[in-house]
Image (cartoon, helix red, strand yellow):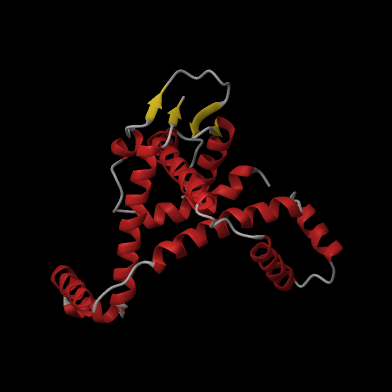
Amino acid sequence: MKKWIRQIGIVFAITTLLAGCGASDEEASNGENATEVPTTEGNVIATVNGEEITEQEFQEILSFVAMQSGIDIHDEEGQEVLTMMEDQLLDQLIDQMLLTQDAKEKGLEANDNEIAEQIDLIKEQSQVQSDEEFHEMLAQQNVTIAELEEQYRQTLTFDNYMESIRADIAVTEDEVESFHDELVTQYGEEALEQDEINYEEELIKQKVNNELTAIITDLRESSEIIIH
């Protein structure tokens, strides 16, 4: 399993969380510490506090996103769409890297026990009878146990990070009522009743999104980001 596969889940999570609430692409790409320099390190297209993003990793992620989005990369229109996606995707990869680095600094990196629990869950779901059978199953997918463990270290670290943000978020009854009234104004009472919205939960998600956006903005300002 290549390194880029381990990043995809986190990239998609950030994309979902920041949809409609983050900085514009131009603001994200041109932050105070994002410096464009000529490529001098071969296939390295960006470094984030010294950590590299390579052209190969980036193109593989881009192709995967295109496939998941139903984009035909072999026709002219598909290529145009990919070109428009490139800057946004690179921004998301940089954000993911910044958050992962920050999570490690804050002691939120997933530990071996958390990873082992996920591996055991996969074994149970796969109904394998032994570790040897499990390793053979992974080998058929060209994945090693070490690579699978690293995948879960990445995704669980991000989960821990998000949980730490959510733990500091609280909403009052007045905030929930105001949020409900805003939605009624936008969509109408009947539409909201049909959707059966949990207003408290949705408001918490909104606050988490806002906090994550603010954190990424601060991390970009305090980090060394070089786009080659």
Instruction: Answer left or right for 139 relative to 10.
Output: right
Q: Return the residue nearer the eye: 182 or 65.
A: 182
* Residue at 31% in and 72% down: 170
* Residue at 40% in and 24% down: 36
User: Image height check: is 117 above or below 146?
Assistant: below
Picture quarter containing residue 28? top left
Instruction: Answer left or right for 147 relative to 46.
Output: right
Instruction: Answer left or right for 36 relative to 108.
Output: left
User: Image height check: is 134 above or below 46?
Assistant: below
> Percent position (x, y) of residue 101?
51, 46
Label tally: 0
> Percent position (x, y) of residue 96?
47, 47
User: Image height check: is 85 above or below 144?
Assistant: above
Q: Return the residue nearer the eye: 72 or 17.
A: 17
> Percent position (x, y) of residue 37?
43, 20
User: Image height check: is 159 above or below 83?
Assistant: below
Picture quarter containing residue 117? bottom right
* Residue at 53% in and 18% down: 40
Question: Farthest residue toward the left?
Answer: 185
Question: Farthest residue toward the front?
Answer: 106
> Percent position (x, y) of residue 160?
51, 62
